[in-house]
Image: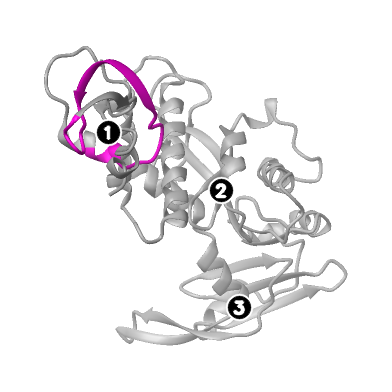
Amino acid sequence: MNCNFQKHAPLEEFYSFGESMCEYFGHRGSKQLHRGKPVRLGYKIWCGTTSRGYLVWFEPSQGTLFTKPDRSLDLGGSMVIKFVDALQERGFLPYHIFFDKVFTSVKLMSILRKKGVKATGTVREYRTDRCPLKDPKELKKMKRGSFDYKVDESEEIIVCRWHDSSVVNICSNAVGIEPVRLTSRHSGAAKTRTQVHQPSLVKLYQEKVGGVGRMDQNIAKYKVKIRGMKWYSSFIGYVIDAALNNAWQLHRICCQDAQVDLLAFRRYIACVYLESNADTTSQGRRSRRLETESRFDMIGHWIIHQDKRTRCALCHSQTNTRCEKCQKGVHAKCFREYHIR
């Protein structure tokens, strides 16, 4: 599935990397508890997505026992490097990766810069390599929107500490603080919205980091329910949901004039599979809706010869040819017109 996801993935500049949870409540040693996710109990999956939520690359978490992390990085940073290597197999393009504080470190930013990859992410204070920024307690006493930053000119890495509702640290090897913009924030004391200063790298991070969250949201809306006793049953459902999400994302890109929501898209796919795998010997009349949807899909319609003459579905005269997929009698001269709206 990884090969197919990467083969059809849209080439973009911005990508997100993060953790996703595959729901599982059985008795299995690899099951984990993640309190910060909507699905808190199950298998952890490392995911790399586009900013819109297309799943490009994924790998189930196996811990450090079966994964050999880089000696200079922790497990999360090593997974980011694996995702970047998978992206660069498609070409050395100006990729920009966004991730949260679980993965970010100054060392990781340095390695990615040497690989020619831009990166931005929130970072924990103890991973800033003792960057001499203002103390968080001191920054909290200043007005909202205040910030402090330092730049390592040799490594071309910036670390910024910004006071929003709380103090947040952001590290980047690609974006600086300029231009500083104004953004709207709710003030609890004034009970109104106020304008606060926001550095450029913070704004870009907030706009582009949510790809994994969008994918999780799409998967959680209409999950495939597989009731199986095997430990891998939930994995199968997760991969099917991810494939449907990816197909929908590609549909939105390719067919901008015919947008459909995720539910309608999944329903259409289900109807097509039900029709294509239906028992042709069963009694009863075919569903008019299924027939209409597949008639105009322009996929797999072939004209074949039939021994018994039947009525043409378009001109209603006798014919000895039919459409193999629609199972309708159609003249060769009527075939194209019958399959076009």
Q: Is residue 308 above or below residue 299?
A: above
Residue 48: image x %, image y %? 58, 47
Do the residues under discs 1 and 2 have CB atoms within 8 angstroms?
A: no
Left or right: where 176 falls relative to 5: right
- The amino acid type, in three-letter code, at marker 3 is Ser
Q: Upstream in the sequence, badge 1 or badge 3?
A: 3
Q: Label 1: which residue?
A: 271
Question: Counting other residues with Cα less than 10 Å from the Cα at mark 1, is it few (<14), some (14-19), or many (20 or more)?
Answer: some
Q: Label 2: which residue?
A: 18
Q: Label 3: which residue?
A: 200
**Which picture quadrant has residue 194?**
bottom left
Q: Upstream in the sequence, badge 2 or badge 3?
A: 2
Q: Is residue 110 above or below residue 59?
A: below
Can residue 176 be found in the magenta stretch? no
Q: Is residue 267 visible?
A: no
Q: CA distance from mark 1 to mark 2?
A: 33 Å
- Which mark's residue is nearer the viewer, 1 or 2? 1
Q: Which residues are magenta?
A: 292-317
Left or right: where 281 falls relative to 82: left
Q: Pick out the residue farthest to the left.
A: 284
- Residue at 30 percent of width and 26 percent of height: 322
- Residue at 64 percent of width and 51 percent of height: 103
- The amino acid type, in three-letter code, at marker 2 is Gly
Can residue 307 be found in the magenta stretch? yes
Question: Counting other residues with Cα less than 10 Å from the Cα at mark 2, is it few (<14), some (14-19), or many (20 or more)?
Answer: many
Question: Counting other residues with Cα less than 10 Å from the Cα at mark 3, is it few (<14), some (14-19), or many (20 or more)?
Answer: some
Which labelled disc corresponds to residue 43? none
Q: Is residue 27 above or below residue 260?
A: above
Left or right: where 240 falls relative to 317: right
- The amino acid type, in three-letter code, at marker 1 is Cys
